[in-house]
Image (spheres, rainbow, N blue to C red):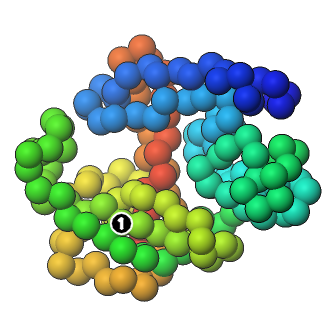
Amino acid sequence: MSNAAAFSGGYVANLGPSEEGYLMPAVDEEGGFFWEGTLAGELRIQACNSCGKLRHPPRPMCPSCRSTDRGWKQVTGKGTIWSFVVPHPPLLEPYSSLAPYNVIVVTLDEHPTIRFVGNLVSGPEGELNEIDPNSIRIGEPVEVVFKRFRRADGSEEALPFWVRA
């Protein structure tokens, strides 16, 4: 991607929710490689090609050295639970019918300042509300899994979820 394209605002594809009604990502040029990775079962993190620092979410400029020379690094997807919450209604459908469920914040082992927000499930096909929130412990080791969702237009996205390691 050229720097001009990155700074121009670029293209954003917001193709709507999944067939189940779950919110899906709006994919732009800067984060497209991340979402291609999730479909391939890979957790990819943007890296600065000048100073080597990892960053997420993807953005055109390194906050450390201000370089716009960027690439991607595949990471293991192993981390620890840094925090969590338990949402309660009122919530958007289909989330309100699943409440209470967990939303966890995970720090990656490769770079503890990179955090992902997701859900703790039992496996790639797990449901948001299948893990008892009272069983979750901060500092607990987890690893990423990817769950595929189909949109109404037939396209697919894979979202990162987390399982106990």
Instruction: Choose top left, top right, bottom left or bottom right for residue 99.
Output: bottom left
Residue 105's x, y, as percent?
41, 67
| Residue 78 visible in this rendered orientation of the protein | no
The residue lying furthest to the right in this view is 50
Quadrant assignment, res 9: top right
Q: Residue at x 36, y 17 (%)?
A: 152
Splitting the image into 4 quarters, where does residue 120 fall?
Answer: bottom left
Task: Name the residue located 42 percent from the left edge and 76 percent from the top edge.
Answer: 81
Residue at numbered disc 1? 104
Number of numbered tags placed on the structure image:
1
Q: Position of residue 132 (x, y in %)?
A: 18, 71
* Above or below 38: residue 55: below
Q: Report the side of 124 relative to 10 (left or right).
A: left
Q: Position of residue 95 (x, y in %)?
A: 18, 44
Vertical order, 149 against 65 (above or below): above
Residue 151 lies left or right of residue 3; in this view the side is left
Q: Secondary structure at mark 1?
A: strand
Residue 66 is left or right of residue 128, and the answer is right
Q: Nearer the viewer, residue 43 or 67?
A: 67
Q: Residue 43 location in percent, x, y?
A: 63, 54
Q: Residue furthest top?
A: 153
**Which residue does the image show at 56% across and 22% down from the upper left?**
12
Q: Residue at position x 45%, y 40% from top?
A: 148
